[in-house]
Amino acid sequence: MNEQQNHLSQLIEQRVTLSQQLEGIQAQTTRTRDLMLKTQGAIEYLEATGVKLPEPEVTEEAETEVVEEG
């Protein structure tokens, strides 16, 4: 094989590898999207049934920082 043929062979191998990597990324994206949608659904269900998180407590230090910045 001459140099150009060798280069072409390497590029074809690289294309196959990149294609496989993209397929893997797409599969991971699909799994992540599905998990996010399930999580969002669970959040919406809990909120619809009246579950709420407690409001964060405002500490004296946090109040002081807001006053000093203002």
Image: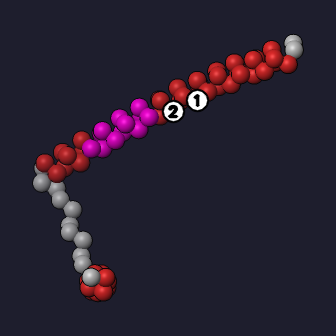
Which quarter shows the C terminus? Answer: bottom left
Q: Distance from label 2 to label 1 (Cα)?
A: 6 Å
Q: Which of 60 and 9 is in front in this view?
A: 9
What residue would you read off at disc 1? 21
Q: Which residue lies furthest to the front in this view?
A: 4
Q: Which of 46 and 33 is in front in this view?
A: 33
The segment highlighted magenta reads: 29-40
Q: Is residue 30 magenta?
A: yes
Question: In the rendered structure, which amino acid carries the disc numbered 2?
Answer: Ile
* Mark seen at residue 42: none
Q: Where, by quadrant of the figure, is residue 54 drawn?
A: bottom left
**Of helix, strand and loop, which one carries label 1?**
helix
Classify 63 as above or below 7: below
Find residue 37 and report its image quarter.
Answer: top left
Q: Name the residue under label 2.
A: 25
Describe the colour scheme in one phrase. Answer: secondary structure
